[in-house]
Amino acid sequence: MSRIAGAARRYGVVVLALAAMLPACSSQADLKQALQVTDVSTGWYDFGVFEGKNKLVPSITFRLRKPADVRLSSVALNVVFRKDTGEEHDDVFVQRVDFGDDHQTQPVTVRGTSGYTADPPQSRIDMLKHSSFRDMDAEIFARQSSSQWVSLHKVRIARELITR
């Protein structure tokens, strides 16, 4: 009787351990498949005057949407801005973006910290037309907890001036 009770106890411990691990395993959603980037708009934000020069920085606004059956309350984001040559220009980390009851985020606006500057009287519109101005792309990466970063979306920053 004690051998059977011992085996049953060990079996019960194994079952409990496996059951405890299941939520941890299933809580990691496949972000590439689960998330959709929507309502994307881009442009060059008028940063104002910086060190006596007009400054423009790349800007992207978007929402993330997930299916109702995906158990995910928030994600971390990293938006990488790259010159059209592929050279990384800037990246911005967003620690937490929450999903609402409608299974999407509020609009997320991310602006680079580095950009282009020009001496007045060159207007900001003229800056976008200047021959040395280079286009940029923005790539949105996401992750949940300590998982790997996943690329969700890549878009060219429009040569449009954003003032707000």
Image (spheres, rainbow, N blue to C red):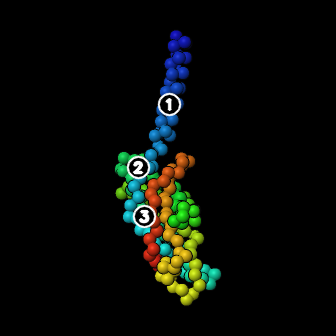
SS class of the residue under badge 3?
strand
Along the line of sight, which residue is nearer the eye, 149 or 164? 149
Q: Is residue 152 visible?
A: yes
- Foreground disc of the pair 2, 1: 2
Q: CA distance from mark 3 to mark 1?
A: 39 Å
What separation in Å lies between label 2 and label 3 (alpha carbons)? 16 Å
The amino acid beneath tag 1 is Leu
Give the answer, above or below, for where 113 lies relative to 16.
below
Mark 3 neighbour density, 10 Å: few (under 14) some (14–19) many (20 or more): some
Distance of mark 2 from mark 1, alpha carbons? 26 Å
Q: Amino acid at mark 3?
A: Phe
Q: Picture quarter containing residue 50?
A: bottom right
Q: Position of residue 87 (x, y in %)?
A: 57, 62
Graded by Cα atoms within 10 Å as few (under 14), some (14 to 19) or many (20 or more), the crowding at tag 1 reads few
Residue at 55% in and 89% down: 121
Give the x, y percent position of residue 5. Answer: 52, 16
Q: Are marks 3 and 1 in contact (CB under 8 Å)?
A: no
Task: Say whether disc 2 or disc 1 marks the residue closer to the N-terminus.
Answer: 1
Q: Which residue is mark 1?
A: 18
* Residue that badge 3 annotates: 62
